[in-house]
Image: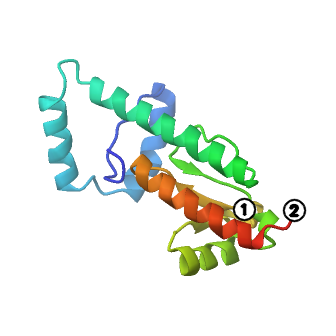
Amino acid sequence: MTGWRLGFLAAPKEAVKHIVKIHQYTIMCAPTFSQYAAIAALKNGAKDGWSDIMSMRDDYDQRRRFAVHRFNQMGLECFEPRGAFYTFPNVSITGMDGDEFAEKLLDKKKVAVVPGSVFGDFGKYHVRACYATALKSLTEALNRIEDFIQEFKKI
């Protein structure tokens, strides 16, 4: 349930023991509305309870591959993420670092990305872009980003 901070963990018992130590002191609980929504989804979903999950997984996979392809096509080197619905393209070809890129992109094209510097020094010339949205919205955002980088590309 993307964005609702609800999920489950399946891991070896020894790993769970250590994960719980961190979890119990950083998270109170999932919001009540998320818990009720999860119950409804599990009770009223498909017979096996997994078809909706598989459908969403396939949708996210399609968006992930699409976003990575588009960023690379634009010249913003981007690896394929394996564990989340965020990409991390390198924006250095624009002559900007991630902070400047994110600020100007928001101002000029109304597209929000997170500067990579918030993840440490290695992210200085990157931005984090989320693809957990409708494909139509993602396409529009990527078109705006492509228009934006054409103004600044330093190849």
Left or right of 57 on screen, residue 85: right
For the residue pair 129 and 118, the one nearer the viewer reads as 129
Rendered view: 118 above or below 142? below
Q: Amino acid at mark 2?
A: Ile
Q: Amino acid at mark 1?
A: Gly
Residue 100: x %, y % from top left = 69, 78
Residue 23 visible in the displayed image = yes
For the residue pair 141 and 19, the one nearer the viewer reads as 141
Q: CA distance from mark 1 to mark 2?
A: 20 Å
Q: Residue, x 73% and y 55% (percent of image)?
A: 76
Q: Where, quadrant-wise, is the N terminus in this rendering?
A: top left
Q: Residue, x 17% and y 29% (percent of image)?
A: 45
Mark in the foreground, 1 or 2: 2
What is the number of the mark on residue 41? none
Q: Which quadrant holds residue 58?
A: top left
Residue 97: x %, y % from top left = 75, 72
Left or right of 36 on screen, residue 93: right
Residue matched to label 2: 155
Q: Residue, x 71% and y 48% (percent of image)?
A: 73
Q: Residue, x 50% and y 52% (percent of image)?
A: 139
Residue 117 visible in the displayed image = no
Label 1: few (<14), some (14–19) or many (≥20) C-alpha neighbours in 10 Å = some
Mark found first going from the N terminus, 1 or 2: 1
Q: Where, quadrant-wise, is the C terminus in this rendering?
A: bottom right
Extreme-top residue of the structure: 48
Circle 2 SS class: loop
Q: Which quadrant holds residue 27?
A: bottom left
For the residue pair 107 and 139, the one nearer the viewer reads as 139
Residue matched to label 1: 123
